[in-house]
């Protein structure tokens, strides 16, 4: 026990003295979180803008202009310069241009307070419907579809007002409040998982390979120190460091973006520990395969780099191609990110997350068995 405590304390002193590594291993995840959270975390809704040109100048066209400029989700500005508005649309500076052509008011149906008289119906039958012209960007289908939907809703409402339309079927709207999550709520647990994977997979592989090359492991082997005591001290020191770093990332996320842990802190800590053990075991495998520190880094990068983008850290796994999802869902990083998100955002408990715990535990056991067979003191 004394050797275990001394080795753990020595490893922690090594971490503390290597301030550059401590700074960058902590600063990089926080920098990534703040940068992505600032740009994408607020989930600002899609903003649309456009122009409207009233070439008719009638009372009816002015009412239509007022309806368009009063939209909440689309910012429509009235202008008389059609060429400038179309140029702005072509350059991508606006999303649509609405033109009310001359004669718009004259083509509207003749109505009376009580509806259409027989004389009015006869007059209306001889005239075509009034039209407006909408220019939109064909290359941006998503924005264009929203813009055209807003225009059609306004035009449809105006048309119904003119003909005194009475709906035969109505819709009763009943809203419910779902879990209101922003991208930053998705991102922060992913950043914690990324930090655990990077620190242990890359850190263990590089450090053990370096110690082997410098003969430190050989000297340890020549003492009465057991391999289990050495590995247990390594695990304990890294668990303490990862726990502290994860807490700092969560604290920064809470102070800057207001993210919260809705579930159990104990369960969150359990998955931090389980993830640390799983990726430490993989790091020991890499350290056993690498012949020197120079080859350990590229091997660790070859494994960790794809996991950054396939493990659901920055993007939901459900958005990936269907053929790729079964492979991604078998990776340890995907289960770690899922478990951390479920605990933090949904408040999931032990019963909901047993499969993530089982799969992470399976990865840890298999990787530990392989690491114990490939580990070399010299």
Image: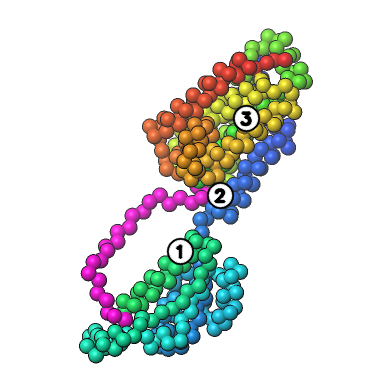
Question: Which secondary structure, mark 2?
Answer: helix
Question: Which secondary structure, mark 1?
Answer: helix
The image position of residue 202, as x and y in percent, is 65, 31
Residue plotted at (40% across, 71% down):
152
Q: Residues within 10 Å of mark 1 (few under 14, many from 20)?
A: some
Give the label on residue 145, or none: 1
Labels 1 and 3: the sequence-earlier one: 1
Residue plotted at (69% across, 40% down):
24
Residue stretch rendered in magenta on the structure: 162-185
The image position of residue 364, as x and y in percent, is 53, 24
Do residues under tags 1 and 2 come within 8 Å of each other at their CB atoms? no
Q: Depth-wise, is mark 1 or mark 3 nearer the camera?
A: 1
Q: Nearer the viewer, residue 238 or 73?
A: 73
Query: Looking at the picture, does residue 315 appear above or below residue 1?
Result: below
Residue plotted at (67% across, 29% down):
299
Q: Residues within 10 Å of mark 2 (few under 14, many from 20)?
A: few
Residue plotted at (50% across, 33% down):
327
63 with respect to 270 (left or right): left
Q: Residues within 10 Å of mark 3 (few under 14, many from 20)?
A: many
| Residue 83 belongs to magenta span | no
Give the label on residue 201, or none: 3
CA distance for labels 1 and 2: 38 Å
Give the label on residue 255, or none: 2
Specify the quadrant that holds the C terminus. Answer: top right
Q: Depth-wise, is mark 2 or mark 3 nearer the camera?
A: 3
The image position of residue 216, as x and y in percent, is 74, 18
185 with respect to 28 (left or right): left
334 with respect to 204 (left or right): left
CA distance for labels 2 and 3: 29 Å
- The picture quadrant where one finds residue 149 is bottom left
């Amino acid at each position: 026990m004394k050797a275990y405590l001394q080795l753990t304390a020595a490893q922690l002193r090594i971490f503390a003295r290597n301030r550059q590594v401590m700074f960058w291993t902590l600063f990089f995840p926080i920098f990534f979180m703040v940068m992505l959270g600032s740009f994408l975390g607020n989930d600002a809704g899609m903003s649309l803008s456009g122009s409207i040109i009233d070439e008719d100048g009638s009372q009816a066209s002015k009412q239509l202009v007022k309806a368009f400029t009063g939209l909440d989700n689309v910012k429509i500005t009235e202008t008389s310069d059609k060429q400038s508005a179309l140029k702005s649309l072509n350059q991508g500076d606006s999303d649509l241009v609405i033109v009310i052509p001359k004669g718009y008011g004259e083509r509207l149906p003749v109505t009376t307070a009580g509806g259409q008289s027989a004389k009015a119906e006869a007059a209306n039958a001889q005239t075509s419907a009034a039209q407006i012209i909408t220019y939109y960007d064909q290359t941006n289908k998503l924005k264009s579809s929203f813009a055209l939907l807003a225009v059609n809703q306004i035009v449809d409402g105006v048309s119904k007002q003119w003909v005194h339309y009475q709906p035969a079927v109505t819709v009763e709207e009943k809203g419910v409040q779902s879990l209101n999550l922003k991208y930053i709520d998705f991102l922060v647990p992913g950043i914690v998982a990324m930090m655990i994977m990077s620190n242990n997979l890359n850190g263990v592989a590089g450090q053990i390979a370096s110690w082997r090359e410098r003969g430190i492991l050989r000297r340890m082997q020549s003492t009465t120190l057991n391999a289990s005591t050495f590995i247990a001290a390594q695990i304990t020191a890294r668990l303490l460091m990862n726990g502290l770093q994860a807490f700092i990332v969560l604290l920064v996320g809470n102070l800057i973006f207001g993210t919260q842990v809705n579930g159990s802190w104990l369960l969150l800590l359990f998955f931090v520990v389980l993830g640390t053990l799983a990726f430490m075991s993989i790091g020991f495998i890499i350290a056993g395969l690498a012949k020197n520190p120079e080859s350990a880094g590229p091997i660790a990068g070859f494994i960790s780099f794809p996991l950054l983008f396939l493990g659901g850290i920055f993007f939901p796994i459900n958005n990936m191609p269907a053929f790729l999802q079964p492979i991604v869902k078998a990776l340890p990083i995907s289960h770690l990110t899922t478990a951390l998100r479920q605990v933090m955002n949904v408040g999931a408990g032990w019963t909901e997350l047993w499969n993530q715990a089982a799969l992470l535990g399976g990865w840890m056991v298999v990787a530990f068995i392989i690491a114990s067979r490939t580990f070399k003191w010299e």
